[in-house]
Every structure is written in C-alpha cells, then in structure tokens.
Image (cartoon, rainbow, N blue to C red):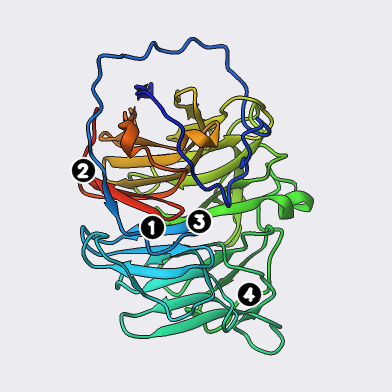
Amino acid sequence: MRLEWLFGLLVACNGGTTGSDDTEETGEETGEETGEETDVPDTDVEPVSFFTILDAPCDQTPEVLEFVDANTGYLGCVEDGFWSTTDAGGTFSQAHPSSNLYALDLKVESDGSLLLCGHDYDDDGLLMRYDGSTWTTLLKYGNPNNDPQNVYMSNCGAVATAGDGQIVVASETIGDISWTEDDGESWAPLERYWSDETVVDNENTFTVMLYDLEFADGGYYAGGGTIIQHPYFFGPSTEGGEFWNFHGYVMSDEIVGEVRSMATPDDGATWFVGGRDTTETSVASGFLAITEDGGQSWSQMELGSEIDIVHDIRFDGDHGIAVGHRYPTSLGGFVLVTQDGGQSWTELVIPEEEEPPVLYRADVVGDTWWIAGEGYVASSTVWSN
C-alpha cells in the first residue's frame, strides 16, 4: 500500500496550537527525515476550490466533531461548550446549558442518545447523557464513598459503550479508567492496572494515556502512549480478563510517541492509527499506520514530508478522512482522503486562499466531510485533486 499524495504551493497561515504536543516552530519534538526520496511535486495540477467555510461557534480547540447524518451534527470545544447543527453546519446553537464545559469526546448510542464526555465545571459532571430532551449526569467528580456515581477523575477524556449498560471511560490526564455495568447507576473505583502484563508492565501502565476509546466487533479498543514510550494500540484482553481489560500492542518499536487518533472502516477488522514521533527534531514526524490482524502487525503509510501530526481519522464505509497539521505549524493543516477504506490516501491540494489552520477534528457522512480547527469549521464534497 502506498499513500498517494500531491503537493500544492503553500503559503504561511496562522493556526492555533492549543492542545497539540508540538506547538512551537523551533523544531522541538517534531520529526527526523527518513532519508527516502520524495516525489517531485506535479506543478501542472491545478488546485480546485472546494471548501464551504461555516460559522464556527467556538474559538478554542475542538475536541468533538460528530455528524449523525448529512444535516445533524455536533461540535464540542475546550472551554467553549457543546453545540449542535441541523443544517449541515450552516448554523450552530448551544446544545448543553453549561457555560463552563470542556467537551472532550462524544458517542452516539443506538437509540440516538448522546454520551458527552468531558468536565462540566458548573456541577462537576464528567459524563452526561442527552436523550433528545433532557441532560442527565451519569458520572461526577467527587468522593466515591459519598455517591456511587462519583470518581476522583479530573476529567473524562474518552468514552465507549457496548450498548447494554456497559460504559467505559478514561481520564485524559493520567492512565485511569472506570466503568459501569448498570448504565451509569454506579461506577467501579478507578483502575490504573487495566492491561495484560504481556506487553505493558502493570507497574508502568498508569503512564500510558488512552486518547481514544472505541467499541467494535464485540470488544473495546483504545489508542495511546506517552511522549517517552512507544505508541500503543489496545485490543480486548488475550489473557481471559474482564471486558475492561486490554491487551497492549506496540505499534512500532522504532517510534516513540502517542497514538492520538484511531478509526476502523469495517467494525474492527481493520484499524488505522495516527500520531507523531516525539523523539525526532527539526522536521515533520507524523505517522499513519494500518493493522489487519488486531494490532499484531502494522504497516505505515507514506506521508508527505510536511505532515507532523495526525490528529483525527474518521470513516463512513469506504469514505475516510484524516487531518492534522504540518511542520512548521505556520503552514497550517492538511486533509487526507480515501475512497477505498484506507488502502490508498490522497493529500488534497488546497488553494492558497483556502488553506486551513491547524486541524484537530474531522468527520464524514456519505460523500460530505467536515473539518474543524480553532475558530474554524468547513465542509466539502471533493475527494480528488
């Protein structure tokens, strides 16, 4: 497999960097050249104008971008709350009443209810459910001895659910998880030693952050790591553990860094993970990798020489999108698209006047995709240069 990519002429554009691990243009924690020859840019390719710029409701880092159909979608930001649209992003309205809400993850349940993960500092809610008319807090920050719905977790950074009363949440600031088997009526005490010992030493598991949680093919999956460890992909326990136990697979022992994004186009038969190599300096060091055997082996896709971090990957069937930012960050964001389930990817040539800022989130429904950065939301139906 080979990532097919093309470069257009780039101009510097300002983009926010809050929440990323390489926010400076000094070259620190960015990447090392591979020594491989790169393709000569095709200067005959004419960029196409394809963005519809939408009215972004928040200025801070977007952590949630989720469309349930071609018109209905949700946007959640650090500090700036949670928003919804019913016209494909043409207009957004506040969807959660808190004015002091960090929205960090969202899952849509089978009945259409929303599970919003983050921290509502107005009432210390960590996980909230919206049934279409009412918000209900399922998990709060607090002393678990006083309330079975309390945990000492500073935030809810990721959530996944099996849809049968099981919900698993993970902290974004330390390697702690909790779970419920009664649909949020009570929660297990925080568990730091949640992985099989075969790959990740349980004494060190707490240092591994889970940046994503997904439920697929009857089990829970996660991606994570730290800036000083190899990137990890976690699948269901292979040691006969509980549903909340994971088996850790090293994505690459030649990379140190984090899996910051993951997605599957086929309910867990294939997984893609993206992130960056934190040991390299002075050049871009993003990675996008695929596994077709549950994480046991990985193949890395070839990326353009300026791609520094893959912040998000999303699929709707064979249509997929991956976004992030370039090095240096003044070059803004990039958009990779696929129409064959990720077997090949195209880096879109973006016209100079439309180049986006650093991109943190994306989503796709059918042949429409959306992207989001700080104070920026756009959509498109273009899939090739």
Label 1 and label 3: CA atoms lie apart by: 11 Å
Residue at left offset 32%, top offset 41%:
320
What residue is pinned by disc 3?
61
In this rendering, the label closer to the viewer, 2 or 4: 2
Q: Secondary structure at mark 4?
A: loop
Q: Secondary structure at mark 1?
A: strand
Give amino acid for label 4: Ala
Residue 369, visible in the rendered structure: no
Give amino acid for label 1: Leu
Q: Nearer the viewer, residue 160 or 19?
A: 19
Label 3 and label 4: CA atoms lie apart by: 31 Å
Q: Position of residue 344 (x, y in %)?
A: 33, 27
| Label 2 vs 1, first from the N-terminus | 1
Label 4 and label 1: CA atoms lie apart by: 29 Å
What residue is pinned by disc 4?
188
Give the answer, above or below, for where 308 lies relative to 85. above
